[in-house]
Image: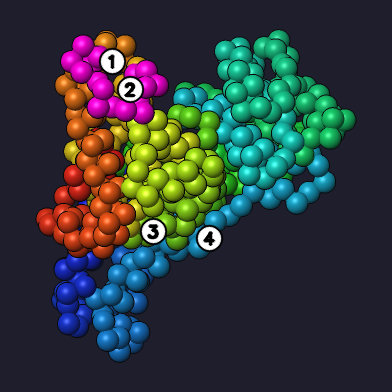
Amino acid sequence: MFSSLSERLDSVMKRVRGQGRLTEDNIQDSLREVRMALLEADVALPVVRDFIREVKERALGEEVQRSLTPGQAFVKIVRDELVRMMGDANDALDLSVRPPAVIMVAGLQGAGKTTSVAKLARFLREREKKKVLVVSCDVYRPAAIDQLKVLAQEVEVDFFPSTGSEKPTDIARRALDHARKQYHDVLLVDTAGRLHVDEAMMAEVQELNRVIDPVETLFVVDSMTGQDAVNTAGAFNDALPLTGVILTKTDGDARGGAALSIRHITGKPIKFLGTGEKTKALEPFHPERVASRILGMGDVLSLVEEVERGVDRDKADRLAKKFKTGKGFDLEDFRDQMSQIGNMGGIGGLIDKLPGMGNMSEKVKGQVSDGEVRRLVAIINSMTPAERRKPDVINGSRKRRIAVGSGARVQDVNRLLKQFKQMQKMMKQFKKGGMKKMMRQFGGRGGLPPGGGMPPGGPGGMPF
């Protein structure tokens, strides 16, 4: 997300940082490019106008004129205005009510509503330690009820059954009564979607909202629809007392215009980002972190939180000991590393959160995709335990067997083994000379070789 916008803004900010002082002329040139970058990212025109006006006003003010580093001050102003545009801070769910807290989820068909309900249920169970009940009031699509039932089992929350022959309001009343009797903390209500906004749909969700009186009414919208997402959010906001937005499919949206426009147009905060298909791929929306990501500053706080949740402590401790000794690192350890990355939401999301990595070319990101990770794990799984512990025993016939078993080519097995040896070599260097020696080898730029490319074997030395 935001990759195209980040690339454009990065070049502008680099030029501005080099300015000894800021004048109306050089600010005007920079803002013209910022304006084009925002419009190309599909940010709504009124939002762009307001953003440019505020940045220009502050950039020509005393705080920049008196600054020793006016270029850096300008970058800070742009970051601050991005944060203001998206909302000053994370707007968490309001669960401080007498249980059950009712959360109603609305949106158009195909936006990812039912999946978002499951993701939210998992988020509330795992991170907020809540007892959650989910119910589908989509009586027009029996498959939607079945889908939610399957997803509820996957995320380990309770499911309240419903049928297409019932009225949505009757289903919601029964589910609420059940949630009270079974002492659930949260009731998540999935509503029917349509292919477009129509009066009958709005009347139905308005009636449902009146009956259950939810503490949160969340609108789910597909970020990839760009300006349509903003317009649809506006229509729902006029009809319902929305409290927030869940922006889905952000992993496939390179522009990010919807995220930058929705708060300004509707006045309602984005509360969550859907970052993938898996039920764990849901992030609380932090405007200040997203603004840093857009400007290539990374999102270290979110990265640390991902690691805290996704890493197996025992395995990490064992791997750390092998790092220190420089011995014993084998393909089973490497497979565990890859699995941990999957638990942390995928490698693409992790790379975007690393400072300076957000603007990495799509070609390089393609080399470190989650599909590539799964392929590597499949190759290692096709080996015997003895082969994983001692890869040197793998000869030509074994390579052919491993390739057939994993659906890969012999060349892929060869590349994995070659790059694994590079990792082992790095381990020994780590023991002998520490990180400084490794950094010098990679050009002394935080692990990146001269020219900003990737170190041997991909980011962090991983074999991709």
Q: Which residues are magenta?
A: 383-399
In front of the other: label 4 or label 1? 1
Q: Main secondary structure of the magenta part?
A: helix
Q: How many numbered discs?
A: 4
Q: Is residue 416 left or right of residue 108?
A: left
> Image point 66% across, 27% down: which residue?
156
Q: Secondary structure at mark 3?
A: helix
**Marked residue nearer the N-terminal end (2 or 3):** 3
Label 2, label 3: how far apart the Cα atoms are: 46 Å
In front of the other: label 2 or label 4? 2
Three-letter amino acid code of the residue under disc 2: Glu
> Residue 226 appears in which quarter of the rendering?
top left
Three-letter amino acid code of the residue under disc 4: Ala
Question: Which quadrant, please, contains the C terminus?
Answer: top left
**Marked residue nearer the N-terminal end (3 or 1):** 3
**Which mark, residue 387?**
2
- For residue 63, above or below residue 386: below
Three-letter amino acid code of the residue under disc 1: Ile
> Residue 224 appears in which quarter of the rendering?
top left
**Marked residue nearer the N-terminal end (2 or 4):** 4
In front of the other: label 2 or label 3? 2
**Which mark, residue 402?**
1
The residue pinned by badge 4 equals: 89
Label 4, label 1: how far apart the Cα atoms are: 50 Å
Q: Secondary structure at mark 2?
A: helix
Q: Residues within 10 Å of mark 1 (few under 14, many from 20)?
A: many
